[in-house]
Amino acid sequence: MGTVSTIVTLLASFDSALTVPTAGNLAVLLRGAVLSTGPRTVTGCLLAAWPWVRKHWSAYANVVRRARMNLLVLARKLFELVVALVPPESVIELVVDESLVRRYGPRVVGIGMHRDAVRSSHGCHAVTPGHKWVVVSVVIRLPFMRRAVALPVLSALYTPARHARRNRSRALYRRHRTVGELALLLVRLVVRWAPGRRFRLIGDGTYGTHDLADALNPASRHESLRGVSLVSRFSLDAAIYAPAPPYSGCGRPRVKGHKLPSPREVAADPDTDWTRLNVAWYGGTRKDVLVCSGTGRWYRRGSAATPVRWVLVRDPDGRRGDEVFFTTDLTLSSQQIIETFVRRWGQETTFQEARALLGLETLRNRSANAVRRSVPLLLGVYSLIAVWFAQHVRTPHDYKRSTPWYSKDCVTFSDMLAAARHDILREILSSRGRPETAESKLTPWPQDHIYTPLHHIRSSA
């Protein structure tokens, strides 16, 4: 009898949330998504997984269009697999960021004109049609990798407030939510999946808002979010105040005290006491920086005065401008705040590798269900490969691929993907061309079955 690859066996963790036919079809598409080197369309995945294809191609296309599946249930099970790699006593670090998946077409659901961060610069603002996804990932440290890796677990599609004039499809949502509102909604879902655990949300300047700071702190109005803190980029001109004085008994109690110097004023003060620190920096390297920090109440009219700790970072070499980071967890040191924010870059690396190695922008679908499901499922494949590699590969460095002109000192996602392909191809080698899958157990292979290339499969209609 043939063997089933361990990565497909890991997919069985999601069987309780899927019907039996959908689980079998999804297993075939997973093999194709891993083995394919071209577009990750349904036909592209079926061409790569043709030895396992036994149904009409429309049965697999209906997985993302019509199959009964709850993405939240699948995301929760994926989150449980990822969190199993985090020590129980450690803080679960979440990173949130948005990614633009370029799409064109007047009938693609949810399409809009968004800023293209890859094509934009300080002097050029490029706008591209496509889907903007707000993605929440879990940042984990793997012993065989030099840097922290961000594994996507939950995502939501952002749609612009105004429907594009050239888009002839219906609006995807009735209510418009900003990027910050979507991020807070995703975080509240993730926190419910791990009650009793502490979380730390990391985001760039887009998520350094009063609304998120008011919601993610020990005194949050949401009881479930009081164990979640925020680390993000701060404004140089942020309005910071001292704590409110004691109530005098007359009038309304004050919510803030006197105004404190802003980070810009502190940076310009010649009497500022700078401290030199050696911190973990981008690319798995270390860097010497000059820092000064302070605490205060971050206040905006109409919102609460949130206690924050901010850190001003200056490059001694003068190659980078002054940067300010803040957190709602006042127990973190300056070095911890900087290194925590630097780990946010793992999300950018995940998006780049998902595009280059998993064909994130090669999807071709336009219906509402397919648009909602395709990108989250493909990002889930990224996390599934990393979890499988960490759990089932005993000697990770044996899969490290180097060349005479490029020598790697650690394992990368491309090595994990190559190991996953090798694991799936063992099904064919061990079964001599007759792979055993969940489908074959339900409907046994006929004795005289002969493989037929995908383009020779006739329609059952």
Image (cartoon, rainbow, N blue to C red):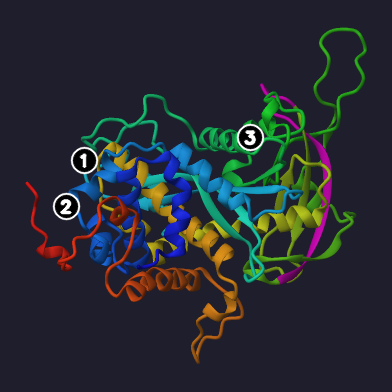
* Residue 50 image-quadrant placement: bottom left
Eyeballing the image, is 78 above or below 6? above
Circle 2 or circle 3, nearest the eye = 2
Residue under circle 1?
107
Label 3 crowd bin: few (<14), some (14–19), many (20+), radius 10 Å:
some
As shown in the figure, which amino acid type bears the numbered disc 2? His
Q: Work out whether mark 2 precedes mark 3 in sequence or the reverse, and give the earlier one.
A: 2
Does the magenta-highlighted stretch encompass residue 301? yes
Name the residue at 65% across, 33% down.
210
- Mark 1 or 2, nearer chain start: 2
Asked if disc 1 and disc 3 are in contact, CB closer than 8 Å, the reply is no
Spot occupied by residue 1 in the image (x, y as percentages of width and height): 35, 67
- For mark 3, give the secondary structure: helix
* Front residue of this view, candidates 67 and 149: 67
SS class, disc 1: loop
Q: Which residues are magenta?
A: 286-304
- In three-dimensional space, the C-alpha distance between marks 1 and 2, rounded to whole angstroms, equals 26 Å
In the rendered image, residue 100, in percent from the top left (x then y), is placed at: 41, 50
Residue 188 shown left or right of residue 335 in the figure: left
Q: Position of residue 284 (x, y in %)?
A: 66, 70
- At label 2, counting other C-alpha atoms closer than 10 Å, the crowd grade (few under 14, some 14-19, many 20 or more) is some
The label shown at residue 56 is 2
Q: Image height check: is 359 above or below 405? A: above
Q: Secondary structure at mark 2?
A: loop
Percent coordinates x, y for residue 89 in the rendering: 76, 49
In the image, residue 407 sits, relative to residue 278, either above or below, namely below
Q: Amino acid at mark 1?
A: Arg
* Label at residue 212: 3
